[in-house]
């Protein structure tokens, strides 16, 4: 069961070592499902609620990627990874040299950046790019703007500015609202 709820109260009993959490929700389905679980131990995982992102912004982005892939005679995935490298968000991580391939398998896009020593031991510094599904509105806007710039460089007709604006507004309204 997964639903949106708000944590209302936390009550700790120091004598028994037990803690009670009170959540509120508007979901009647959640009430019925929780009622069925009342007599069982459950696994509880609470994370910050984020609305699902707009498919319009994602669809517009992938439409652009498809046009570029066709013009470049390559596949969409290669163009997507190229756009992540140029306009996406990333982090640096340092790993043991024997872990480089494992890291590459876990990230959508990553590359070896440099060799470094950490406490006298060799390590590889890697540049790791996050997939666009984790982007907030500002980050997605940068990715789309960069992709449109690349389309123009290829002589392709980008989407109309009003279509881009609508897609990004929908991303803002329905998208993930993270700081960034």
Image: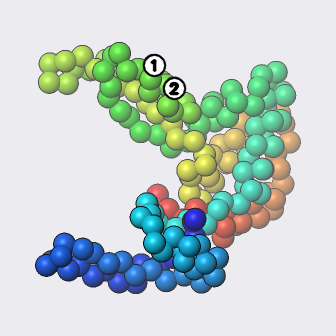
Compared with 143, 122 (above or below) is above
User: Which residue bears the numbered disc 2?
Assistant: 105
Q: What residue is shown at x 20% (from left), y 24% (from top)?
A: 118
Q: Secondary structure at mark 2?
A: helix
**Which numbered dot is residue 72?**
none
Residue 99 pos. (x, y %): 37, 21
Residue 46 pos. (x, y %): 44, 65
Bin the neighbour count of mark 1 within 10 Å (Cα to Cα): few under 14, some 14-19, many 20 and up.
Answer: few
Compared with 11, 123 (above or below) is above
Q: Nearer the viewer, residue 14 or 178?
A: 14
Left or right for 177, reference 80: left
In the rendered structure, are the residues bearing label 1 and label 2 in contact, judged by CB atoms less than 8 Å apart?
A: yes
Quarter holding residue 66: top right
Q: What residue is shown at x 54% (from left), y 81% (from top)?
A: 25
Residue 175 pos. (x, y %): 63, 63
Instruction: Count the marks.
Output: 2
Left or right for 32, reference 76: left
| Cα distance in 3D space between marks 1 and 2 | 6 Å
Compared with 91, 133 (above or below) is below
């Amino acid at each position: 069961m997964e639903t949106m709820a708000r944590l209302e109260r936390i009550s700790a009993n120091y004598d028994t070592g037990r803690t009670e959490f009170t959540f509120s929700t508007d979901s009647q389905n959640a009430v019925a499902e929780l009622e069925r679980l009342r007599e069982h131990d459950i696994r509880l995982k609470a994370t910050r609620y984020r609305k699902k992102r707009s498919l319009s912004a994602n669809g517009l982005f992938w439409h652009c990627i498809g046009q570029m892939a066709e013009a470049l005679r390559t596949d969409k995935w290669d163009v997507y990874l190229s756009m992540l490298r140029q306009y996406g968000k990333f982090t640096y991580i340092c790993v043991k040299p024997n872990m480089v391939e494992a890291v590459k398998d876990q990230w959508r896009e990553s590359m070896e950046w440099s060799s470094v020593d950490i406490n006298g031991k060799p390590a590889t510094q890697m540049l790791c790019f996050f997939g666009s599904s984790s982007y907030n509105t500002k980050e997605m806007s940068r990715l789309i703007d960069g992709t449109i710039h690349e389309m123009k460089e290829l002589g392709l007709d980008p989407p109309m500015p009003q279509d881009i604006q609508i897609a990004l507004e929908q991303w803002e309204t329905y998208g993930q609202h993270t700081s960034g």
